[in-house]
Amino acid sequence: MINKEHISKRFDADLEEVRTRVLQMGGFVEEQIERAIEALVDGNESIIDQVVANDHRVNAMEVSIDEICNQIIARRQPTASDLRMIMTVIKTITDLERIGDEAAKIARMARLIYSTDKLHTPRFSEIKHVAKIALDMLHQALDAFARLDLNAAAHIVRQDELVDEEFRAILRQLITFMMEDPRKISTSLEILFIAKAIERIGDHAKNMSEYVVYMVKGKDVRHVTADEIEREIKS
Amino acid sequence: MINKEHISKRFDADLEEVRTRVLQMGGFVEEQIERAIEALVDGNESIIDQVVANDHRVNAMEVSIDEICNQIIARRQPTASDLRMIMTVIKTITDLERIGDEAAKIARMARLIYSTDKLHTPRFSEIKHVAKIALDMLHQALDAFARLDLNAAAHIVRQDELVDEEFRAILRQLITFMMEDPRKISTSLEILFIAKAIERIGDHAKNMSEYVVYMVKGKDVRHVTADEIEREIKS
């Protein structure tokens, strides 16, 4: 009996360790996006370089959490909700790693923008706005994971629709810029790729919030609408 | 003893079933890309509609394979190479599902291109060329998964560099088109999104081939160079 209790406590400690590491990885990825956007707006080249250089740390976090999850499955043979928690972690870190890639991509685009035209860079107010929503989605998805909060998911899925709309608005605006002045085409495309990267961050945050519903309810809500998710949460 | 043998045979049958389903899903996703590109070149609207409509089948395949993998882990408690195989499947189907999304995206862009300008659509020779490489990468990644073939991975990682180069060439060409004739900006951006979707298909195929190395060698080769992968395979 004591032995069983001991194993169960070790198991809980293992799960807690994994959860903490996912939140650390999430916090670091949030920082990477914030700094990439800050560097884009300010044109601060040393921050741009740091964001690009730091991406390998995000990758290393993914590989190491993945390894811990495999060890837990092999040693502790989790079932039911414990197994769902591990599966959620494995999927979540894949999305976090790809959000990290998008942050590095934003930084590389910022570098390109400032290397060609230091004087006529735009104010990026729309980019800052949509990045704020995507960052908020990511923060909420991490919170939902930490607190097993189901209500966040439906909200995040709706915010994702907003991000997609904002992306289309930015695209229309950039097309107008390009038509008015073909010399702005290259920089406009770089801004377009940044907007696309932010839109993808929203997609990944949405994925993460859907895994939380799966973890808590045992129901797979990927590929369903926000309305269906709300129904599922209430059921 | 007989009982143990029986369980082990059931387990092998489970793994075989999962492997078959992944290959079926992969085959269907390959078809989706082929048809999307074909519809783009021919402007065949009924095929465009079919590709978009079929995407939900790819999603359903992902959800169902995921479910089978969870059941296998909970019931059979696999360890070592069996567990790695299941983990490889779980990651592979995420990439396959996203490749499916890219196929649907290509079809939707094709619809936009033909809805605005039926007469002046480009020949798409560069798009066809880069799509052929990405499809070849996907086919090889699925083959490598089926045969546990390590050598494919290093080759696919190199092909991915080629796809990235082709993407940059298409981007430069599109910028030239847009500068010469600003009326071509909208269609050029749609073609750019198609090229981007193909480039992402290459990325996903690369991920899949890296999981095969992990499955066979137990070594995580994500985020390392083609040279390092080759060294790892030979070791």
Image: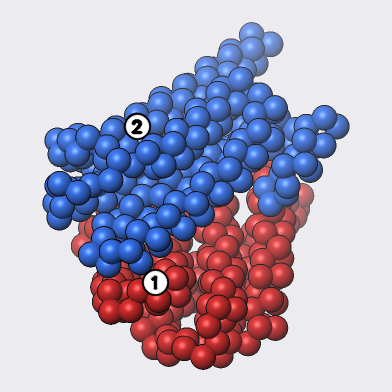
Chain colours: A blue, B red
**Amino acid found under the numbered disc labelled 1:** Ile
Residue that appears at 58% across and 18% down? A12
How much space separates mark 2 and mark 1, taking CA atoms?
Answer: 31 Å
Question: Percent x, y for residue A183?
Answer: 23, 64
Residue A75, how many percent across, how many down? 54, 32
Residue A104 appears in the rendering = no
User: Dot 1 lies on which element?
Assistant: helix
Q: Nearer the viewer, residue B179 or B9?
A: B179
Give the percent coordinates (x, y) of residue B128: 43, 84
Q: Which residue is mark 1?
A: B185
Report helix, strand or loop for mark 2: helix
Q: Up-down: is A226 above or below B164?
A: above
Note whether B9 is above or below A235 in the view shown.
below
Q: Relative to A103, is B37 above or below?
A: below
Horizontal arrangement in the rendering, residue A10 relative to residue A79 (left or right): left
Label 2 sits on residue: A34
Which kind of residue does numbered mark 2 sit on? Glu
